[in-house]
Image (tube, rainbow, N blue to C red):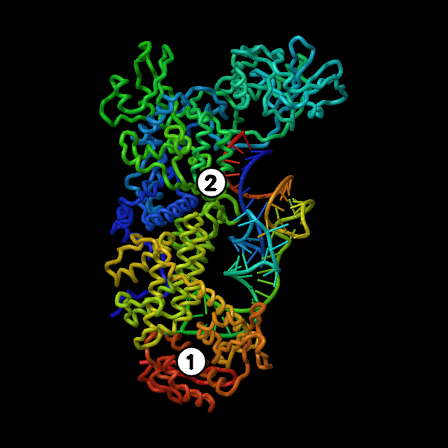
RNA sequence: GGGCUCGUAGCUUAGUCUGGUUGGAGCGCUCGGCUGAUAACCGAGAGGUCCGGAGUUCAAAUCUCCGCGGGCCCA
């Protein structure tokens, strides 16, 4: 009875994977793999939540399989690895998708449409492609709990976020300020940096040099700008404290500018004085236009950001229209002026009635004219630079100061840096590179968004006295807001929350919520605790913090990787994760980023349906280091499958085919390793060396090295050497010890390989495991994914033996080359090969001499020392290294020729068996016709021929009759004509 | 425009941190061999300005600087 199910030589991976998926589903294998480790040391993972309002992209799939590999590996290593899925559901990108659908173009239109309806649409849209996400996730084998995911729009999640914001607020870190943000005056909305990045275009803007007259002196500061309209908001002029400035006489006027920027002047000038920038500090100048200003203004200040690359070294500062401008004015305690409204039009604050209500960019020309008239324009030209435009409507964006709520990250800078110290980054350069630099220069977090679909900012302000109150829980909300429905399903989103009004504790006035929602990056940054509804439900969070591992693509460095660290540092002063793997992106075949607009996004689903998930996974793992960009190639996926998965399959196929024939049962055999052959000990040694390397690489997230090592092992060591060299041992008909050793060794290697590869290619390994383990060893785990990861058995690693095999391989290669050079095919037996080498080497190789003999098809292998061997003419020589060479005796005699002829005949008969697709065990009869030499050779070697070809009878003559099936062919072997026929029942 | 990163045969890549034999593989190509040996395998061959330039050094794919190109982030 055969113990193993027989297989087809060609695997149908797609079908196999679907069967395995069904099996896992039925057996609850994932759940059991997690549960089995309950109580063990935890390996905490946080899923970076995707948004399901679009289809999953190849990059998402890559991230998912890398996560899966690591989590499966850690589970098999004995860790308790829970995996909670998550969905990111808030934010501007969601709103924009809905706006597209509704055809709205501004906030105003949304309000008209109704916030309630709009938010409902947003909520509906975020799971539009949930099914596709779930299917793709399952199909690629990513084991994650999608039945109880965390969802950022859930009340419980929002409540945790609120709690955390209140923590921050009560420490005085959540404050209201102004932020200069890119703003579309037509859509009346701020844009995210991502949107802004999409809209840069090269444009020509005016370039003007403006003269600012110093008070009490007939001297002008010369400043340069490309945005004349911002001059109405001018508050200060900035110079660099250390650079040299010059007073120059031009015609009748005295101008001040940086010495290094004298090029900016036209015509003749005379330098009449030099001074440092800091010497100019505090000088007051006359306002260009009479615009009301709150606070101090119109004096010269110093700033490090002033450069000498363009302009005059004197920078016009308008805090309402520039981020640097705003910050420097704030730092120096200067005032503020905002003569532009939210539509980008001048307000009545400016002293020119004809410009009131005019769009700022349209006013440039007239402003220049007015300067000219007042004699304040030094010169005018145009300037080509890149400027951002609204990606939706094409309007030029304005940098515009808006009221905004901030988290004071700057004051947490040292803590952020200290916490980053505790994190291992893969690749390492990010730690102090991109990420570290970012932390060094960290800015306060602009948290609020003047939008609709997001976690509402939980701050209420008294309309009477301005008192602030931050609500940290639903409980607190209900307490404060009389008349709020007490049922628990009150939706915390806008617009409902907007209607909740408090009574002010201070003055009894009405408190209303700040209308903003918060940046959705804060939502996902809160995932470590909010996914467990901490602190309202405590236990899970405490066991799951900090996380051991997160991984996402490189673009998350300043995204989620940062928001996690920022939130966690602000609230717990702990790093939220200890290891972070940053993945590269997937580019198309030409190395260009995949994007919808370019239409070069690959359809992963079709690859999964035609080639399979294991092949895709293996490609991702082997293609390059995980942190580098992959040039995606569908052809390469198929190639790797052919190369690796097919070879693995064929090794397995070879085993089950012969193990079935021989009714081999591993449960009944136990043979100590030292009793097995050198070949067996060698492959086991290689296997254990491999296990060691794979574990080492995986611990460093060098997934590509681990995978490539296994691939080399399977193809070179196992298939092309061990199995090829050992196959005759399996063909022996009768029971014998050596055959048992071979079966047992191959079996053990395959089982270990299954476990080793299970995290990489979970489907095919499960399939193989089910057939070769579960069928015979019932006490074993029911799934390969429930097994322990292999650990290397050092006692089986024999470095010396591996060395010797290396040497033999080299000798074989040399021998084959010698044959090739001499034009003698391998089927032709030769008399001897002489290896000239050191004594040390010959001792090494001597135990493996049988392999050499067989591979090179020679009757004898001799070892000689260099000094003692003189090669005759009949030897073909091939050098190996300085003191090693191989000499092949290429002389032929009658018996060698005859033996060669016999092997040729056997080869033909085997070919004919294959033509008929005969069963491996089917017996045949042979009939032949040929000359005397053929007849003699066949007679002399009839036993050998019968054994090799499973012939029960060999007769001379032509086949005829109808009792048997006849397959006949005429062959030319060398110069001889031979007729061969095989007869089968 | 700035920061980080990658650039090695037609393609995919190892080697770069830690400078030192003749820069290794695989796919593809040419020739030969082998096959109850798997869309496989073996041997040989063609194919490299190691992105370009400069520098450091006895010696540079490797270290430094300046460019060019791709990618990401930021403006």
Residue A866 or A364: which is nearer the viewer? A866
Q: Residue at x 75, y 17 (%)?
A: A272
Q: Chain of mark 2?
A: A
Is residue A114 visible to us here?
A: no
Residue A178 higher or lower than A894, as above or below: above
Answer with mark 2 or mark 1, whichever residue precedes in sequence.
2
User: Where residue A783 appears, x then y in whole percent?
Assistant: 28, 55
Q: Name the quadrant of the N terminus of chain A.
A: bottom left
Q: Which residue is mark 2?
A: A554
User: Where residue B15 appears, x then y in whole percent?
Assistant: 54, 53
Q: Which residue is mark 1?
A: A906
Residue A765 or A318: which is nearer the viewer? A765
Q: Disc 1 on helix, strand or loop?
A: helix
Residue A177 or A273: which is nearer the viewer? A273
Marks 2 and 1 belong to one chain: yes
Q: Nearer the viewer, mark 2 or mark 1?
A: 2
**Horizontal arrangement in the rendering, residue A72 relative to residue A778 (left or right):** right
Q: Which mark is residue A731?
A: none
Q: Residue at x 43, y 47 (%)?
A: A701
User: Where residue A487 appears, x then y in whole percent?
Assistant: 22, 25
Please tell me how crowded label 1 is: few (under 14), some (14-19), or many (20+) other residues with Cα within 10 Å.
Answer: some
Q: Chain of mark 1?
A: A
Hey, which quadrant is residue A16 in on the image? Answer: bottom left
Residue A525 higher or lower than B63, as above or below: above
Residue A148 higher or lower than A448, as above or below: below
């Amino acid at each position: 009875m055969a113990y193993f199910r027989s297989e087809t030589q060609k695997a149908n991976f797609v079908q196999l994977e679907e069967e395995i998926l069904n099996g896992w589903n039925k057996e609850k294998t994932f759940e059991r793999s997690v549960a089995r480790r309950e109580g063990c040391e935890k390996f905490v993972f946080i899923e970076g939540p995707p948004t399901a309002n679009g289809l999953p992209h190849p990059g998402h799939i890559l991230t998912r399989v890398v996560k899966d590999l690591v989590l499966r590996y850690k589970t098999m290593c004995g860790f308790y690895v829970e995996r909670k899925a998550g969905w990111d559901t808030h934010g501007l990108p969601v709103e924009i998708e809905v706006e597209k659908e509704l055809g709205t173009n501004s906030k105003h239109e949304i309000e008209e449409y109704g916030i309630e309806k709009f938010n409902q649409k947003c909520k509906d849209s975020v799971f539009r492609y949930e099914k596709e996400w779930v299917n793709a996730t399952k199909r690629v084998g990513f084991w994650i709990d999608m039945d109880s995911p965390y969802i950022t729009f859930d009340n419980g999640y929002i409540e945790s976020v609120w709690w955390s914001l209140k923590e921050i607020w009560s420490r005085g870190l959540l404050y209201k300020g102004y932020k200069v943000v890119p703003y579309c005056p037509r859509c009346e909305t701020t844009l995210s940096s991502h949107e802004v990045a999409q809209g840069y275009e090269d444009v020509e803007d005016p370039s003007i040099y403006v003269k600012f007259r110093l008070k009490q002196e007939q001297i002008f500061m010369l400043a340069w700008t490309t945005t004349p309209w911002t001059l109405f908001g001018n508050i200060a002029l900035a110079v660099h404290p250390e650079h040299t400035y010059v007073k120059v006489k031009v015609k009748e006027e005295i101008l001040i500018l940086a010495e290094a920027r004298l090029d900016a002047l036209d015509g003749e000038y005379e330098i009449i004085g030099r001074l440092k920038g800091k010497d100019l500090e505090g000088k007051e100048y006359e306002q260009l236009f009479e615009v009301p200003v709150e606070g101090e203004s119109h004096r010269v200040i110093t700033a490090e950001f002033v450069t000498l690359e363009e302009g005059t070294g004197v920078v016009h500062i308008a805090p309402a229209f520039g981020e640097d401008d705003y910050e420097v004015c704030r730092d120096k305690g200067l005032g503020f002026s905002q003569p532009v409204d939210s539509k980008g039009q001048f307000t009545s604050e400016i002293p020119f009635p004809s410009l009131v209500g005019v769009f700022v960019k349209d006013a440039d020309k007239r402003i220049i004219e007015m300067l000219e008239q007042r004699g304040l324009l030094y010169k005018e030209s145009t300037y080509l630079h890149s400027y951002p435009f609204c990606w939706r409507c094409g309007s030029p964006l304005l940098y515009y100061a808006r009221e905004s709520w901030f988290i004071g990250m700057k004051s947490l800078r040292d803590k952020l840096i200290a916490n980053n110290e505790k994190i291992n980054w893969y690749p390492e350069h990010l730690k102090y590179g991109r990420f570290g630099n970012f932390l060094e220069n960290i800015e306060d977090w602009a948290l609020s968004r003047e939008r609709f679909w997001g976690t509402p900012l939980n701050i209420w302000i008294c309309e009477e006295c301005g008192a602030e109150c931050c609500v940290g829980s639903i409980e607190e909300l209900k307490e404060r807001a009389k008349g709020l429905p007490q049922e628990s399903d009150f939706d915390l989103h806008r617009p409902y929350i907007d209607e909740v009004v408090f009574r002010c504790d201070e003055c009894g006035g009405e408190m209303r919520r700040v209308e903003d929602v918060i940046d959705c990056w804060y939502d996902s940054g809160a995932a470590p605790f909010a996914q467990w509804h901490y602190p309202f439900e405590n236990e899970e969070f405490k066991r799951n913090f900090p996380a051991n591992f997160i991984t996402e693509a490189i673009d998350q460095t300043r995204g989620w990787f940062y928001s996690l660290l920022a939130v966690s540092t602000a609230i717990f002063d702990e790093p939220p994760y200890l290891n972070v793997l940053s993945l590269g992106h997937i580019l198309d075949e030409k190395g260009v980023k995949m994007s919808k607009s370019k239409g070069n996004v690959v359809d992963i689903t079709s690859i999964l349906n035609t080639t399979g998930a294991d092949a895709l996974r293996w490609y991702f793992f082997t293609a390059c280091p995980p942190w580098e960009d992959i040039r995606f190639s569908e052809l390469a996926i198929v190639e790797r499958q052919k190369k690796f998965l097919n070879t693995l399959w064929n090794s397995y196929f070879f085993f089950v085919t012969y193990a079935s024939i021989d009714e081999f049962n591993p449960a009944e055999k136990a043979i100590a390793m030292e009793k097995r052959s050198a070949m067996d000990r060698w492959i086991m040694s290689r296997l254990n060396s491999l296990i060691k390397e794979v574990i080492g690489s995986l611990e460093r997230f060098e997934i590509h090295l681990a995978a490539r090592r296994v691939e080399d092992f399977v193809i070179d060591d196992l298939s092309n050497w061990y199995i090829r060299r050992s196959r005759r041992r399996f063909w022996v008909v009768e029971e014998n010890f050596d055959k048992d050793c071979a079966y047992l060794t191959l079996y053990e290697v395959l089982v270990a390989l299954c476990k080793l590869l299970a995290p990489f290619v979970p489907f095919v390994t499960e399939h193989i495991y089910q057939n070769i383990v579960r069928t015979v060893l019932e006490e074993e785990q029911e799934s390969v994914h429930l097994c322990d990861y292999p650990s290397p058995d050092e006692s089986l690693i024999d470095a010396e033996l591996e060395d010797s095999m290396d040497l033999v391989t080299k000798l074989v290669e040399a021998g084959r080359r010698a044959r090739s050079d001499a034009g003698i095919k391998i089927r032709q037996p030769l008399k001897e090969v002489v290896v000239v080498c050191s004594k040390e080497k010959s001792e090494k190789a001597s135990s493996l001499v049988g392999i050499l003999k067989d591979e090179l098809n020679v009757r004898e292998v001799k070892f000689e020392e260099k000094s003692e061997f003189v090669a005759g003419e009949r030897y073909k020589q091939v050098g190996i290294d300085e003191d090693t060479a191989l000499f092949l005796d290429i002389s032929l005699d009658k018996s060698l020729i005859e033996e060669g002829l016999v092997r040729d005949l056997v080869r033909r008969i085997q070919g004919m068996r294959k033509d008929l697709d005969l069963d491996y065990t089917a017996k045949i009869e042979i009939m032949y016709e040929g000359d005397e030499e053929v007849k003699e050779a066949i007679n002399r070697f009839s036993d050998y021929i019968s054994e090799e070809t499973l012939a029960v009878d060999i007769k001379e003559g032509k086949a005829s009759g109808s009792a048997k099936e006849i397959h006949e062919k005429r062959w030319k072997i060398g110069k001889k004509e031979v007729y061969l026929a095989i007869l089968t029942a």
